[in-house]
Image (tube, helix red, strand yellow):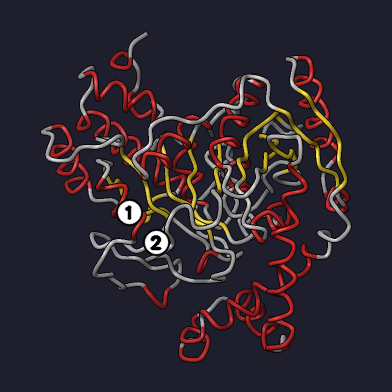
């Protein structure tokens, strides 16, 4: 079956790029199919908060007419509303910035455009990319959370409104919403995608990444920003270490069983799986991560806290207030401990290509008042390590369960190759859309 015979909005990034390059489809046709899906479903899913069809089709025309070139030519993408855009307002998920219009695109937006990609619009974020949820819903079950804070990014990709979307993570805001919605989340090594033009929250941790429908798509788009088009392979049988820690006490039994089943499947496919316990000196960093966040967020959101506190959510106000009780000496000490741990973290990857770890406790939570537990991304974000999350099974209520693979600092291509091999072994894990 060729690309032209499919619903074009269901094409992944790689398949669409090849079809555009070969002339099998046009960017205009692809973008129009995505726009039609947005018009059909966004009223229910609330992933997009801003979309200008005329602007998107104009960019697609330019791509088809070869006014732009590059590995991402003609590929539509969505942008989390924590990231500045010159053509769209950027509200950061807050009423304070309801009419805020940046003068320039963030660096990651400009780079994607320069490589030929087409902006579809802005997607919902939690308030300043924190735990206060957006209005986005999980397209797999509209009564359940899509996760946070990259809720709109995950929902848009899972609902076939966009093949890929920019997201961001300070604790677990890429890996969790991706698995809640049954898609793939990729948080690169810290600063692999430039954060210039993203609203600061915790600058020592904030990381821009992507949510896509396959590891291959996430790799193609992200490496395409750097002008690369391939992923270095570690072979078809990556070496994996299943990492245990005290955080497993918070993992639901169905997720534990799904991860154990995954281990058996990849071992049966010829992969090597070892078991390791998180080094004792790294465990305390999980609690440091939240205190570091509170201190830095209090500094980053000083204007909002001091001038517009009545427009902040009670949840965010309370977290910022907690930061008041963290002194400078403690902050410097935390940064030093983190720096030393980042250097020591290399030891986790001796003899393995990636570490396997839960991405979420279980299925997406029912209700829209909470975005779920972000704890399983905390340590890896703090250590600046790349991670890829993906669905591994369907849970008892019919929603996805997920895991993540974590890689060595700067070894993103090795991690992506390992994740691609593992997800190929798993095969499709699909839950029905609402």
Left/right placement of residue 427 relative to residue 54 reads right
Left/right placement of residue 61 relative to residue 22 reads left
Q: Quadrant of residue 295?
A: bottom right
Extreme residue toward the bottom, this view: 306
- Image coords of residue 59 (percent x, y): 18, 43
Q: Quadrant of residue 364?
A: top right
Disc nearest the viewer among 1 and 2: 1
The residue positioned 32% from the left and 35% from the top of the image is: 34
Q: Nearer the viewer, residue 413 or 7?
A: 413
Q: Nearer the viewer, residue 157 or 331?
A: 331
Above-or-below relation of 249 to 334: above
Name the quadrant of the N terminus.
top left
Q: Quadrant of residue 239?
A: top right
Tag 1 secondary structure: helix
Mark on residue 372? none
The local crowd at label 2, few if under 14, some if 14 to 19, many if 20 or more residues have their Cα within 10 Å, is many
**Label 2 sits on residue:** 83
- Image coords of residue 18 (percent x, y): 31, 22
Mark 1 vs 2, N-terminal side: 2
The residue positioned 76% from the left and 26% from the top of the image is: 262
Name the quadrant of the C terminus.
top right
Above-or-below relation of 262 to 317: above
Above-or-below relation of 208 to 412: below
**Label 1 sits on residue:** 109
Tag 2 secondary structure: loop
The number of numbered discs placed on residues in the rendered structure image is 2
The residue positioned 53% from the left and 71% from the top of the image is: 201
Marks 1/2: CA–CA distance: 8 Å
The local crowd at label 1, few if under 14, some if 14 to 19, many if 20 or more residues have their Cα within 10 Å, is many
- Image coords of residue 270 (percent x, y): 75, 15
- Image coords of residue 246 (percent x, y): 88, 53
Asked if the residue at tag 2 contacts the one at tag 1, i.e. Cβ–Cβ closer than 8 Å, the answer is yes
């Amino acid at each position: 079956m060729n690309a032209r015979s499919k619903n074009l909005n269901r094409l992944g990034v790689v398949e669409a790029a090849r079809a555009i390059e070969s002339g099998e489809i046009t960017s205009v046709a692809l973008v129009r199919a995505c726009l039609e899906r947005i018009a059909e479903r966004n009223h229910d899913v609330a992933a997009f908060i801003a979309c200008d069809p005329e602007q998107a089709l104009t960019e697609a025309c330019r791509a088809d007419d070869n006014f732009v070139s590059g590995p991402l030519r003609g590929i539509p993408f969505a942008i989390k509303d924590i990231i500045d855009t010159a053509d769209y307002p950027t509200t950061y998920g807050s009423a304070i910035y309801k009419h805020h219009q940046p003068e320039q695109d963030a660096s990651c937006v400009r780079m994607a455009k320069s490589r030929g990609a087409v902006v579809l619009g802005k997607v919902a974020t939690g308030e300043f990319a924190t735990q206060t949820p957006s209005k986005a819903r999980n397209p797999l079950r509209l009564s359940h959370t899509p996760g946070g804070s990259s809720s709109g990014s995950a929902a848009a990709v899972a609902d076939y409104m966009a093949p890929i979307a920019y997201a961001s993570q300070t604790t677990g805001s890429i890996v969790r919403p991706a698995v809640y919605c049954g898609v793939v989340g990729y948080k690169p090594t810290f600063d692999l995608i430039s954060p210039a033009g993203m609203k600061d929250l915790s600058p020592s941790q904030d990381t821009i990444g992507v949510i896509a429908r396959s590891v291959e798509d996430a790799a193609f788009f992200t490496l395409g920003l750097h002008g690369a088009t391939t992923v270095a392979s570690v072979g078809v049988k990556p070496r994996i270490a299943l990492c245990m820690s005290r955080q497993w006490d918070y993992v639901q039994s169905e997720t534990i069983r799904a991860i154990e089943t995954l281990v058996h499947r990849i071992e049966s496919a010829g992969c090597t799986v070892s078991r390791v316990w998180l080094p004792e000196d790294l465990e305390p960093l999980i609690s440091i991560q939240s205190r570091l966040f509170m201190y830095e967020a209090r500094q980053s959101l000083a204007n909002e806290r001091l001038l517009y506190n009545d427009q902040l959510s009670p949840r965010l106000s309370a977290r910022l207030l907690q930061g008041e009780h963290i002194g400078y000496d403690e902050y410097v000490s935390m940064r030093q401990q983190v720096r030393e741990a980042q250097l020591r973290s290399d030891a986790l990857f001796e003899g393995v290509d990636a570490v396997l770890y839960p991405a979420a406790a279980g299925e997406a939570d029912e209700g829209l008042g909470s975005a779920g537990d972000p704890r399983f991304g905390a340590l890896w974000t703090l250590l600046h390590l790349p991670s890829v999350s993906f669905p591994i099974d369907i849970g008892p209520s019919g929603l996805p369960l997920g895991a993540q693979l974590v890689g060595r600092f700067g070894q993103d291509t090795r991690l992506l190759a390992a994740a691609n091999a593992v997800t190929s072994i798993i095969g499709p894990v699909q839950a029905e859309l609402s």
